[in-house]
Image (tube, rainbow, N blue to C red):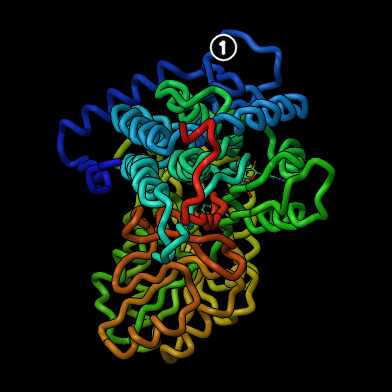
Amino acid sequence: MNLMPFKNLSLLNFSEESNRKKMLAALEKVRSDFGKTYSLHTANVVSSSNSPLIKSLNPANPAQVVGAVESASKADAEKALQTVTEGAKTWKKVPAEKRIQLLLDLARWMEDRRFELSALMVYEVGKNWKEADGDLCEAVDFCNYYAHEMNRLSAPRLTQAVQGEHDTLSYFPKGVSLVIAPWNFPLAILTGMTVASLVTGNTVIIKPAEQSSVIGAKLAEGLREVGFPLNSFYFLPGVGEEIGPVLVNDSRVDLIVFTGSADVGLSIIQSAAQKPKSGQRGVKKVIAEMGGKNALIIDEDADLDEAIVGSVQSAFGFQGQKCSALSRLLVHEKVYDIFVKRFIEAAKSLRVGDPTMPEFQVGPVIDDIAQKRILSSITDAKSRLKLLYEAKLETKAGYYVPPTIFEVSDIHENYFQNEIFGPVILIKKVVSLEEAVSDANSVNYALTGGVFSRSPSHIEFVKREMEVGNLYINRGITGAIVERHPFGGFKMSGIGSKAGGPDYLLQFLEPRTIAENTVRRGFAASESA
Ligand code: NAD
C-alpha cells in the first residue's frame, strides 16, 4: 500500500489568538456535554442504565461530574471475551490494507476533534492546554505511525533466494489482546496500545483507567464511527481490582498490554505465567510498561539557564504525574548553591490552579486518593529531609498539591528510591559525575533520565553508564515524540519494546517462516484445469 511518509502532528501554538478562541469554545462545548453516561462495548450515550456507574469528576472542581460510564461486572467481562474471541476469527482475515486504512481514518477523526478531545482531558484529568494538546498529538501519531509500521511488516519477507524453494518470513496476529491503561496519558497511551492490537489483526478488550473512562469512551466512539467491526473491539471500563484479574486470568486472552504501576504490572506478569488452564492455547504474552524514578544530573559546567528551564518543566509539568517526570536532581557541588537558588525561584513563578485557565501552569492531581497520598508523603518527608520549598496554594477547592522541593543526602531514603507521582522533587549534592551516575542508577527503575553538561567526555560517560530507557542530553527529560524518541524503560520500569518505535508491533505478532518447494510437479487436477 502506498502511503505518504509518516509525519508527526505539530503541537498547537496557543499564543495565536485563533487557537485560544477555538480552545475556549471547545471547553464550553465539552462542559455542555457534562453528565452524559456511556455504555459498555460501543460507548453509546445512554439515557438510563441499570448497571453500576463509574462517575468521572473534574479534579479541579470535584463537584462537577464530567461524565459516567457503565462499570463492567464479571458477567460483562464474559460477554466481552465471547465477543472478541468470536471476532478474532474474522478480523485476522481482514486484509492488512483495510486495517491500516482504518487507523489512518481514526487519526483523522481525532485530528478533526482535537480541540474537543483536548478540552475533555483538561476537565477529566487536569491537564493544562498544552499538555492536553501534546497527549492528543501523540494519540494521532500512534495511529499514523503504527499504520505505517504495519504496512512495512505486512508483506512477507524473502529470507534467502535459493533455487527450488521459496522462503519467507511473515507475521500473524496472536488472537485476543487485553489492553489495561493508566489515566496519566488518557488518550495517547490507551490509543497506542489499542490500535497496535487492532492493526496487527488482534481483537481487543479496552480497559481504561477508572479516572479517565470518559476519554476512553471517546476512543471507542472513534473506533465505532470510523468503521472498526463491532466484534473487533469491546470497551470495558470497570474497577481494575475487580474485573482486571478476571480478564487477565481468562484462558481466551493471548496478549496482555499493560501500562501502569509496577505493583499491578508485576501481579499481571505473575498471573500470566501460571500453568495454562484448559482452553488456553499458549503462553500469554505480557507487555508491561511500569513506573520510573527519573533523575537529571546537573554537571559542574552545565548551562544553568537551559538546565533550570529543562528541570522545572520536567519536574512540574502535569503536576509531576508523567511516567517520565523528573523526581531526583543530582547537582554538582560546584554549582549546587546557585542552581538550587535559581531552581526554587523558578518553581515560585509557577501558578497552581484550574487548568481550564491558561494562566495556571500547574493543575490538580488526579483524585482525592492521589492528593492524600502525596500530601502524606510530603508530611512524612518533612520529618527526615530538609524542606527547601513548598508552594502556597491559591485555591483549595480541587485536588491540589503544592510543588515541593526537598534536599536529600542519603540515597537509601524511601522517596529517593520510590515513586511519589506528584509535584515533589528531591535534590542531592554530588562531588563528581561518577557519584551522580551511581546515585541515579541506585534505584530499581530505568525509565528516563538526563544530564546537562558541556563536557563531551562527561556526556560520553553518561551515555555509556546511565541506566535508562530514554536518555536526554542538555534538554528536559519528558515529552517523547513518536518515532523520534521510541519510549520505554527496563529494570522495574518495564518489559516490552519501545512504544512508538520500530520493534513495538512485533510484540503483537507471531513470526512464521514458510518454506515452499517450488520444483513443479503439477497441481491437483481440479485446480490446474
Ligand atoms: P495503576 O497500576 O494503578 O492502574 C493502571 C491500570 O491497571 C488501570 O486501568 C487500573 O484499573 C488497572 N488495574 C488496577 N488493579 C488491577 C489488577 N489487579 N489487575 C488488572 N488491572 C488492574 O496505575 P495508574 O495509577 O493508572 O498510573 C500511574 C502509574 O503508571 C505510575 O506508576 C506510572 O509511572 C506508570 N506509567 C508508566 C508508563 C510507562 O510508559 N512506563 C506510562 C504511564 C504511566
Q: Position of residue 438 (x, y in %)?
A: 52, 85
Q: Position of residue 500 (x, y in %)?
A: 41, 54
User: What residue is shown at x 35% (from left), y 53% (from top)?
Assistant: 482
> Is residue 402 visible in this depiction of the protein?
no
**Viewed as shown, does residue 28 lie left or right of 85?**
left
Task: For label 1, count other residues whose C-alpha is less than 10 Å away and answer few (under 14), some (14-19) or many (20+).
Answer: few
- SS at mark 1? strand
Residue to which mark 1 is pinned:
46
**Viewed as shown, does residue 113 lie left or right of 60?**
left
Q: Is 480 located above or below residue 173 in the figure?
A: below
Q: Nearer the viewer, residue 138 or 210?
A: 138
> Is residue 175 visible in this depiction of the protein?
yes
Q: Is 191 located above or below residue 373 in the figure?
A: above
Q: Position of residue 57 (x, y in %)?
A: 55, 29
User: What residue is shown at x 21% (from left), y 28% (from top)?
Assistant: 21
- Label 1 CB-ligand 1 distance < 8 A: no
Q: Is 355 located above or below residue 515 in the figure?
A: above
User: What residue is shown at x 64% (from left), y 78% (from top)?
Assistant: 412
**Viewed as shown, does residue 264 lie left or right of 354?**
right
| Number of numbered markers | 1
Residue type at numbered disc 1? Val
Image quarter where the N terminus lies is top left
Q: Position of residue 36 (x, y in %)?
A: 52, 16
Residue lying furthest top in this view?
Answer: 47
User: What residue is shown at x 34% (from left), y 56% (from top)?
Assistant: 483
